[in-house]
Amino acid sequence: MTPVVFTANDGYYFPEEYAVGTVNGIRVVRNSETRITVEGAPTANASITLTAPKAKTFTVTYNANGGTGEVPTDGTDYFSNAEVTVKAGTGLTKEDFAFDGWNTAADGTGTKYAANGKFNINANTTLYAQWKSTVLEYVTFTHAYDVQRNPAFPAKGTIITLSSFKYPLVANGTHGATNEGTWTLTEVGAYYTVKNTASDCLKSVVNGIAGNYTGIIADEIVIHELKNGSTPVAYGVVVAYDAASGRAVFLGDTWSDGAGYLLATGTQTDSTNMTATAVPTDFVHAADYRITLDKTGTYTFTAATVGYAAQSPVTITVTNAGSVATGTLTVALTDGDTDKFTLSKNTIADIVVSGSDTFTVVPNTGLAAGTYTATVTVSGTNVVPKSFNVTFTVNAITVTFDANGGSVTPTSNATGADGNLASLPTPTRNGSYSFKGWYTAANGGTQITTDTVFTKNTTIFAQWTYTGGSYHPATYAVVVEDADNGEVSASTTAAFQGTTVTIQVDPDKGYTLETLTATDRSGKEIELTKVSDSNYTFKMPASKVTVQATFMEDNTMLNFFVDVPADAYYYDAVLWAAKNGITEGTSATTFSPDIDCTRAQMVTFLWRAVGSPEPTTNVCPFTDVDMDSYYGKAVLWAVENGITKGTSTTTFSPDMACSRAQMVTFICRMADGKPVSSIIAFTDVPADAYYAESVQWAVENGITNGTGDNKFSSDATCTRAQMVTFLYRYFVK
């Protein structure tokens, strides 16, 4: 048969599904978006149904193009040739730049659109924010108007009335001399460096400024050279600059009585006034020396306990955000406890434009209990210094002294920075006893000396030797009865009267302690002192003591969720997360342990686990994050602390399932963790993968053991149960 060609009208297209396989020798071929062909040789009757082509739709995307803040969004699917109204960029900012509309090309070479401008769309379109410099030396003016004025110089912050010029601009566009061209201002130094080539007019200008401003010396006033293209025109002083309208008032040495120009980036046709917002010494120098640090505000190291091991350093990136090389930079600890932290370097070599370098800061080891803070400052001969603070808390270890039938002062002491006690008190006891020493238990145990290193809060016990001759004081039995659904033990099986005996209870999984009693031989109940959820103590009477305990099913989880069984591996983790407000579940009664954990849930769990700190800004870089959502602040916090950079520069993808690789990376970045070994524990984790070090760190810290067969399963989605378990292992175990 003769092929039959179908062509879509303008604005319509054939989707890929229009192609049809061979049916009785006939087939439909999609040649292009706008053309399909029916062809072949029929072998039998064939019926093929063709539907009309679909109308094309197009989208408009806005790109901040280096700016930050709220990027406009447009969710409309536009039909071909539909009219689009361009949105405003009022929520966007960029340091040293003012928003200047949109362009179809990032570099401004495409079609320019102002806010509320309109165009007809025929292709998917990205509009890039355009920026014009607010640093005077980078501005190019297109018009220069001769606006010779009287020599009186306006005070800073007052209004310059353009009608006060001898040749003022008026509404109909009439003005004094005007020139179109490429007009630029370049700083050439202080007045004294150019006065030998300048006219007396410039001298009167700088003297007028010095006369109006307290503390300004005429010879030190910054002078700019005005050029039209490459041709020098005049030396002078900029007395006002309005970045928003792109206008500057320049008084120069070309004419007498303070003659000069009104410079504009577009045609000036009205007599709008300007505010004298700047004097020459306020302007940024032509060589723009600027640096940024990726850490701002305060960086808090994870708290440690006295006797801690070396901490992981935090890495700081210094970026040259200026227009010239930085020169040598100095890195210093400038305020606070400067001797309690260590920098990896004190100088940074010259950083090229847009380049970067790094250094680290870490708390010193061996610090005593307390909170230490310092300011880290990066400075240079030309750059404006940038700083941020660091803080590190060392928690004390308290050793409690149990005189075990005697008395002692003090009853407790804190260890030193090395985890040792500087001295041990000597207890006393009535009767024929001599002090034997301090031990880890009331009977038996390990002896304690000033060389003993403590790593946690500890109670130690005095032990005594009877010295009353052949008589030895009686010891009394401590009998612990067996219990169902848990274990009970005592620190000794026999003790002297007055000895402190410790009872330890350990419920089976899914059970909790219901009752615990200690009775003497007459059945009288002995007072128990709760030391912790698992430890209780009593003073031994002059009698045998019987200890009994009962355990019951732990229904605490039912106060939170009904879908977390007591024998689940994640039971303790979910209970911890629920009790500490880290998770609220997927409903009032369910946790949904087996569903995927989303990226939004992941950062929220992390944020809540560290106390839900307030982010330092409310400007989110991601267009798909609703700041009123439960995860809004958590995402901002995660970005500020380098935990996530999003899935692109403008998206976070909150509803995307979090992979196991992303999970360990988030936790590792939060902890600022570094693995000890460079050998990766799993065969499916490439050494150059972005998450490789995070996985190894997680293994070394007992957070994960993989999924079996020496695999980590990096790309597998992380369930909610796995997520809270990983957090529990990091924060609790």
Image (cartoon, rainbow, N blue to C red):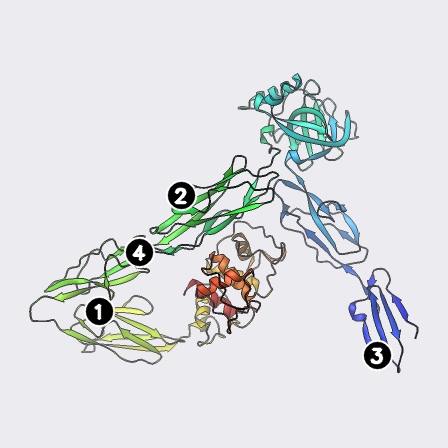
Residue at image mark 2: 338
Instruction: Tell me where residue 209 appears, x and y as whole percent.
Output: 60, 22
Q: Element at badge 4?
A: loop
Residue at image mark 3: 23
Residue type pointed to by label 2: Thr
Label 3 Cα crowd, 10 Å radius (few <14 / some 14-19 / many 20+): some
Q: Earlier in the sequence, mark 1 or mark 4?
A: 4
Q: Nearer the viewer, residue 522 or 656?
A: 656
Residue at image mark 4: 419
Q: Element at badge 2?
A: helix
Q: Nearer the viewer, residue 418 or 17?
A: 418
At x 32% / y 73%, what residue is drawn?
505
Instruction: Tell me where residue 419 appears, x and y as whole percent.
Output: 30, 56
Residue contact between numbered discs 3 and 2, judged by CB atoms under 8 Å: no
Vertical placement of 200 versus 78: above or below? above
Which disc number belongs to residue 444? 1
